Image: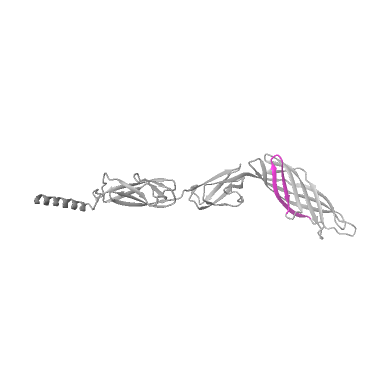
Amino acid sequence: MKTIRHSSNVLVGLLAALAACGGGSTSGVAAVQLQSTNTNPRVGETTHLGATPVDTHGITVQGVVCAFTSSSPGVAAIDATSGAVTALSVGVAVMTATCGGKSATVDITVRPNEVTLTIQKQGNGNGAVFANPPGSPNFVPGTSIQITATANSGSIFSAWGGACAGVPSNSPCDLVMNADSTVTATFDLSETFVSNTWNASLGTVTDSIGCRYAISASGVMTLNVVENLNGTMSGIGSTTAHIGIVTVYSPPYTTCTAMPFDTSGTGNISGSDASFTASLSSSGGNFSMTFTGTRSGTTITGSATVRQTLRDGSGTAYPTSGTTGSFTATKQ
């Protein structure tokens, strides 16, 4: 009986020694190697974490089950058995894989979703729209961009719309991309017409001492016409007019002095091809010209009413007016 009892004690001690040689694990796992398809997913994306248990020689240990956990499931949740990671919110989550008593970790950094800039061109004209910084239409939230529009020859950039509505057409549009945004840029056809010389007789003026003058006006008109997509016409008209003043009567013993001069007027065009008006005036308002005309192909035909207020040395006003004959403006 004593011999048998002694042999049993030896066997138990041998098993304990074998367990100690295994480092407290009977699986043979010395380390865990981790692989991730993407450690920087965006919110809503899914990635996958893989774990491989290996022995001291780096050889895969078969038949060992691995379990996965996340330090921040609200940032990135992980399936405990498959290792599938779902990105839920911006932040960092530490993923742990445990296999046969050994563990390894990897950081998963969840990035915010990108926002998209959509640029749409409108109108019957042509041009280019650029966003700076350039590149992809997708941007990290909070990115500041500047959008500029450049019209092609024969076109004009008319208006911003969408997320840039309200920005003047002669300014770039500055945006902070915090959400998906759509910007519209309207380009219209732009054409320049230059007239032959127009002439108008503005009648006569008799001043306070009895001098009488014949007043005339002549000049060339330029129409920078914008053909809007809705069929209307707009743009800017301008003219430089020569105001002629000729003495036609001088009272006895009186010297009457005539002093011709040049003036200019600018103003807006409104209407359509069939009938439009250009209302021009000088900065001081003494000169005005209202042109009414129609367009046929490359020619604009019409007539104008011209008004010029003259003033003597005391500031007394002498209004004059007259009409031109029909004249034409040709597309340049």
Percent position of residue 186, x then y: 60, 45
Query: What count of labels does the image hold?
Result: 0
Residue 268 drawn in magenta? yes
Give the color scheme: rainbow, by chain, secondary structure or one colour. Answer: one colour
- In front: 23, or 9? 9
Magenta stretch secondary structure, dominant: strand
Q: Nearer the viewer, residue 321 or 91?
A: 91
The quadrant the C terminus occupies is top right
Q: Is residue 163 left or right of residue 48?
A: right
Who's the residue at 16% across and 51% down the image?
A: 12
Q: Looking at the picture, tell me which residue is in the foreground, 15 or 285.
A: 15
Q: Residue at x 30, y 50 (%)?
A: 32
Residue 51 x %, y %: 32, 47
Find the residue positioned furthest to the right: 252
- Per the rendered image, the range of residues in magenta is 260-282
Residue at the front extreme? 1
Q: Position of residue 142 (x, y in %)?
A: 50, 53
Side of 255 where 167 appears, left or right: left
* Residue lying at 9% horizontally and 50% vertically, measured from the top left: 1
Task: Give whichever of 101, 42 is nearer the camera.
Answer: 101
- Residue at horizontal 57 percent and vertical 44 percent from the top: 121
State which quadrant residue 124 falls in.
Answer: top right
Q: Is residue 328 magenta?
A: no
x then y, percent, for residue 204: 84, 51
